[in-house]
Image (cartoon, rainbow, N blue to C red):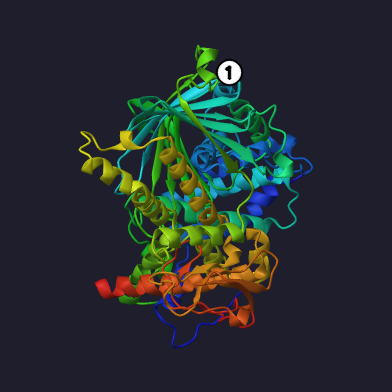
Amino acid sequence: MSGEQYRPDEDALGAAVRALREAAAPPGPGAETLQVVLAAGESWAGNLRAPQRKRKATTMKTLMKIAAVAVLAAGLAGLVYVLTPGNGGGISRPAFAQVVEPLVSARNGSFTMILEMPGQPKQTARTVFAENGVMRTIMETPAGPMTQFFDMPQRRMVMLMPPQKMAIVMEMQNLPQADQDLSKVNMFFEIQRQIRRAQQQTDENVQYLGEQVVEGVEAVGYHVRQGPMDMTVWANARTALPIRMEVAFDQALMGGEAPMSLVMTDFAFNLDLDPAEFTAAIPQDYQVSTMPFDASVPDENALIESFQMWLELTNGRFPDDLSIQAIAKGIAPRIAMRIGAKVLGAKLLGARQVGASILDQEDMQKIMGLTMRLTRGFMFVHSLPAESDWHYAGKGVTTADEVQAIFWYRPKDSINYRVIYSDLTVAEAPAEQAPQVEGAQEGGGAAAADEPAQPETEEAAPASP
Amino acid sequence: MVDWQSIVQGHRGLVWQTVYRIVGNWPDAEDCFQETFVSALEYSRREEVRDWAALLRWLATKRALDRLRRRLRQGARSAGPVDCDGLAGRQAGPGEEAEAAELAENLREALGQLPPAQAEAFCLRFVESRSYREIARQMGVGVASVGVLLHRARRRLRARLGSMLSEK
């Protein structure tokens, strides 16, 4: 298809596209570049063979559902991709043996993680993967150090708060059938297994960044795009060991504000670990709370439940937008308000220190439970594919207003839209009758304008932009 | 057995033109040219390639858009001066050439700010003149989704270009 004509009254976009199309390239590329490309094919000629079946990640998918681990797992998956030969855009990369050796042969590993969100204090944690499948993270909080154990073989997460002598144990429930057997899951083993698999696969979203000095060391860099996340990995140019990894989230996904970012540094492998430090054993003098963790895939019902909980916390006001950042910023103060009365009471009784130490086990359990249930439903929204064409129009809407559509989307393989109303009822609507609300937030967090109720077809669309 | 020499020689012009249009300068275009063919090689190891032209055009577009985004993250526009010789074929005056070059550069900047899927669909449709069906096949989405992506891309690009013009 070629030779499209532009309308005489083309706008700036049409003129710009025409300028781009007609900007003929100078003769190229250079002879050296061409030779490199030809040589690459010759060295691979013997390896071009019949297509191989793609293998899907299995157990790692389970870990993604745990909100606290989702970022970490995605970041590590990116590390797997970019440090595997065949990935990255350039010809000159660290040799295969150098790149794969430290990760594939490691018995365990550790790194420091720094999480930054605009308007929030920076959080730093030290994470260690042990050989028995347990991941331990120690995080400094205003209330003192907090230690989290992710014990996948036992399907549980344990959170220890030494200053308060409290422990919260979350047991995973409702695991999808495909993910039932976690008995042989060792998170670090799984990373190593993914590396070996990834040798046969490539990721089109991986870019080689070249070399530069990072933290005082000459490093090679790779950039990976995985969905809404941007990951940049810098590895020692000589040893290929990872030095620094940065993960940033799509600005649109964050509601148009500066993105949340995660930095991982100080990698170390094959540590001399004391097995006793990775048993997630709870000291006998701790107060223990046990709560279930729903590991099933969130669906529309989870979203409705999240809306319900939000309305209870806000006296009937819907969130302004559904970006991860906006929800995260909104959750903390609203949950704090729930337990605020206790803090206020302590003040009135003349408590010397009013702070996190006032919170007892019941408070912590409430916080954890509320946070998990609230975020679960909103994560459903962000797990929807681009084709779902979701919209959110709840900003400024309250339960006292006239009932109106606040969220709608098109489920996979459906031609109709599902519409959630401000009274939390749900109805289906054909595409041409899907709500049209000016200013509605779109899937991906785009600044919204009017959206056609029906996706345009090739026949109906203009030939020029 | 794949005849790599024939593939490269037969499609080098297509790939070069595609990447150069999007990135607008020689060094980036050379890098993207190389990356495109390497990606195609790797792709051919795991999938049978029935249409090398379509594959290379798609990969070239993706690589060039990735480079554009990276350049914008680093705060640069075009890496070099406008190549007015490249516009000679339009037989336009110097003033029109400069205006066209600026329009094209504005569009590059706006494309670099689009979500990747929207930018990719837009370039394949309006710069490379691919059909909805081909775009859907290469991007692994439904044809209806292509329409949605294009609608959003056009709206954002119009808004962005409008802002650029009003800033002058």
- Residue in the picture at 37% in, 65% down: B105
Q: Where's residue A229, x and y in %?
A: 48, 48
Q: Where's residue B132, x and y in %?
A: 64, 71
Q: Is residue A314 left or right of residue A94?
A: left
Element class at badge 1: loop
Location of residue A91 (image quadrant):
top right
The reply to whether residue B2 is visible in this rendering is yes
**Residue neighbourhood size for the residue with mark 1, other residues' Cα within 10 Å, grouped as few (<14), some (14–19), many (≥20):** some
Residue sitting nearer the eye, A219 or A338: A338
Q: Where's residue B151, x and y in %?
A: 52, 74
- Residue in the picture at 50% in, 11% down: A272
Q: Quadrant of the N terminus of chain A?
A: bottom right
Which chain letter matches label 1? Answer: A
Q: Is residue A143 left or right of residue A297?
A: left
Q: In the orientation shown, which residue stands out farthest toward the bottom?
A: A8
Which residue is label 1 attached to?
Answer: A107
Which amino acid is tagged 1?
A: Arg
Location of residue A193 (image quadrant):
top right
**Image height check: is A207 above or below A403?**
above
Residue sitting nearer the eye, A158 or A29: A158
Total number of numbered labels?
Answer: 1
Residue sitting nearer the eye, A153 or A450: A153
Residue sitting nearer the eye, A341 or A276: A341
**Image height check: is A215 above or below B101?**
above
Q: Where's residue A394, x and y in %?
A: 44, 70
Q: In the orientation shown, which residue stands out farthest toward the front?
A: A349
Q: Is residue A52 left or right of residue B156?
A: right
The reply to whether residue B94 is visible in this rendering is no
**Image height check: is A276 above or below B13?**
above
